[in-house]
Amino acid sequence: MHIPDGIVPIGVAVAGYAVTGAATWYSLRKINQADDPREYVPKAALLTAAFFVASWIHIPIPPTSVHLILNGLMGVMLGFFAFPAILIGLIFQAVLFGHGGITTLGVNAAMIGIPALLAHGIFQMRHLASFGSEEVRSGIFGFVGGATAMGLSVLIFFALMVMTMPADINAEIERAAISALSIAHLPVMLIEGALTARLVTFLLRVKPTLLGGMSEARA
C-alpha cells in the first residue's frame, strides 16, 4: 500500500504534496479550535506508534501478502489529529526503513490520511442514528469507518497505479498484478473494521472519554 520512490510521475508526486499540505493545514486548524489540543497528544502518540508498527505485520494472502494500515482506527480515535499523526508515521517509515518514499510521501499521506478523516466523519454519524444502544451504534459505525478507510485507500492506490502506468511495460500483466494486490486487501478491510469496532465498544465500557477524538472542537 505504500508507493515507493520512482513509481509515480513527478507531477503526481507534486500534487500529492499539495493535497497533503492542504489537508495538514486544515487538520491543524481544526485541532487548534479545541479547548485544549494538548490533551489529545498522548493518545495521538500511542496510535502513531501503532500505525508505525502495523506496516510490519504481514498477512499472507496468496499469491502475495498484505499488511494492516489502521488508518480507519486512527480516524475514529483521533479525529483531525489522525492526518498529522499518519504523516509523522509515514515520515519515520520512509526515513528509517525505506518503507514508502520521500518523493511519494505526499501521495502516500493523502492516500492513507484522507480516508482516515472520512472514517472520523462516519463514526461521528453514530450520534445521528436512533437504532439500538450506544454500544451497538458505536460498533457498527466503528466497523464501517475502519473498513471504509482501508477500502478507499486501496481504491486510490489502484487508480494511481493504473493511471500512471509507464507506456514501456506490458500493461495487461501489470494491471493484473495491481488488481490481484488490491483484491488481496479485501479481507484486511474486514479485519480492520472488526478491530476498530471491537476497540471502540471496549473503550465505551471502560473509558468512554477516549472516544472523544477532535469532535469536540469548536466549529
Image (cartoon, grey):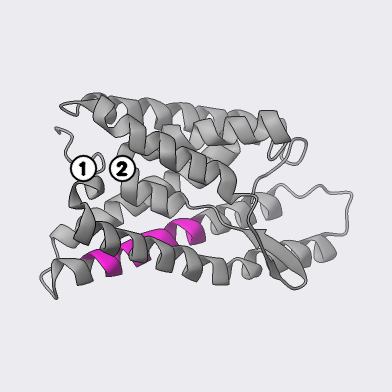
Q: Residues within 10 Å of mark 2 (few under 14, many from 20)?
A: many
Q: Residue at x 20, y 61 (%)?
A: 205
Find numbered disc 1 in the image and state the secondary structure of the residue it sits on: loop
Q: Residue at x 42, y 54 (%)?
A: 72
Magenta residue span: 138-152
The image quadrant where one finds the C terminus is top left
Relative height, residue 198 to residue 14 (above, below):
below
Task: Kindly identify the amino acid type of the residue bearing the numbered disc 2.
Answer: Gly
Asked if labels 1 and 2 touch by Cβ distance under 8 angstroms, the answer is yes
Secondary structure character of the magenta stretch overall: helix
Q: Residues within 10 Å of mark 1 (few under 14, many from 20)?
A: some
Relative height, residue 106 to residue 150 (above, below):
above
Residue 113 visible here: yes
Q: Residue at x 27, y 29 (%)?
A: 31
Q: Quadrant of residue 45?
A: top left
The residue pinned by badge 2 equals 79
Q: CA distance from mark 2 to mark 1?
A: 6 Å
Image check: 79 left or right of 159?
left
The residue pinned by badge 1 equals 215
Q: Position of residue 100 (x, y in %)?
A: 68, 39
Image check: 175 left or right of 94?
right
Relative height, residue 129 to residue 92 (above, below):
below
Is residue 151 located in the magenta-colored stretch of the structure?
A: yes
